[in-house]
Amino acid sequence: MNDPQTATPSPADMARTRPATPTVSNTAPKRAPSALFDYAYMGYARSGEERRIGSGAKDYLDRLADLASPEDWDGADTNYPDEKRILRNYVERTFEQAKRQGRICISGDNGYSAFNTGLATSRQETIYGVFQRNNLPERQEWRFQGWQVESSRILLDTFSSLPDFVSYTNDPADYIFDWRRDLKVNTRHIVEDNITRFPADLQQEPFQLELTLNGAVDLARKRVRHNYKTAVPFWYPLQGQVQLLLPLSLRNPATVDLALVVSRLGEFYRGDTVLTTAMAYNNARLLARPDGDWLQPTASSDESLSAPTD
């Protein structure tokens, strides 16, 4: 087996060995610190260009995508094509939750650790991330060994029991929108606080946009009553709870422009904010692969929602 530490360091590992220098970016939002890269040395990370031209050894994202049941992990993002940004967000946030819930198992000899990715192969074998103890000084405590399926020898021989799936709620009702309850939305507040997320041609008339948003909310309520799958559950780490997403069609009923974030407060729902569909998909995917008819990985984004890591 090749030692991953002999490969080219990943960007996150290289950043730890060089002085911090201020950078200015007009487009790329800042990413939250990664608990995964703090925990383990992950090895070589390919750039999007290397993936496009087929050069370089496969990195940890490529190998996981190859092992897991086929899925669109890019979202046809024209700004960052073939970066597997949805998968990266999924792996990092899932690991954070596993760490937060104490669901990282350590072998009896203290030489290996593992977490449950929540993903499965086409044969429905659960996939685990496995790490070896890192003996190099001044480095992460662990180094990435590889992705292993539940029947692999290394898992069966090394761990007395395997880590469980991470969880985000203990109440199944959190995943379903109860159309009998009232939905209250402060459209003025949402428009004022999120104006740049709305289509550019609608941003010039805030009052008219409020009226349009009210109509889109009413349409979304009718849509979810006809099909309960319209309301997509997603993990909102900024509030640490499962919330629901409703589609907002602002210009054409056949096109979804934004997602309305809905939370349950006692006996009613409140519309809290709006997200781009890219942001919404990234965090909805943490719970399950959305099977609704409107939230698809048509565009990915680094502007994923994240909570402070432990």
Image (tube, rainbow, N blue to C red):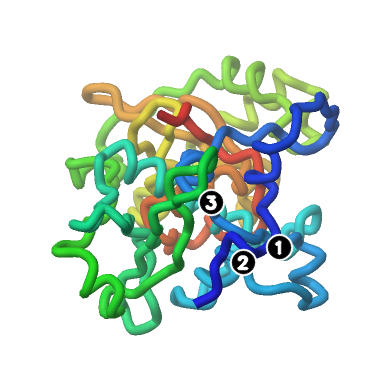
Q: Is residue 28 above or below residue 1?
A: above
State whether residue 63 is above or below residue 79. below
Using the image as rendered, state which of residue 223 and residue 272 is in the foreground. 272
Residue 131 horizontal/vertical position (percent):
40, 58
- The residue shown at (48%, 45%) is 36
Against 263, residue 136 (above or below) is below
| Farthest residue, direction bottom | 123
Label 3 crowd bin: few (<14), some (14–19), many (20+), radius 10 Å: many
> What residue is pinned by disc 2?
59
The nearer-to-camera label among 2 and 3 is 3
Disc 1 marks a residue whose amino acid type is Arg
Q: Earlier in the sequence, mark 2 or mark 1?
A: 1
Q: Position of residue 96 (x, y in %)?
A: 40, 41
In this picture, residue 192 sits left or right of residue 134: right
Counting residues from the start of the chain, the first of labels 1 and 3 encountered is 3
Q: Tell me the CA gap for discs 2 and 3.
A: 12 Å
Alpha-carbon distance for marks 1 and 3?
15 Å
Residue 256 placement (x, y as % from top left): 61, 50
The residue lying toward the viewer, choosing from 83 and 259, is 83
Which secondary structure lies at badge 3? strand
* Mark number displayed over residue 41: 3
Front position among marks 1 and 3:
3
- 253 to the left or right of 166: right
Q: Is residue 223 visible?
A: no
Q: Residue at point 26% right, 79% down? A: 151
- Amino acid residing under circle 3: Tyr
Q: For residue 34, say whether it is visible.
A: yes
Name the residue tied to disc 1. 46
**Is the C-beta separation of discs 2 and 1 under 8 Å?**
yes
Identify which residue is drawn at 38% across, 65% down.
119
Q: Amino acid at mark 2?
A: Asp
Mark 1, residues whose alpha carbon is within 10 Å: few (<14), some, or many (≥20)? Answer: many
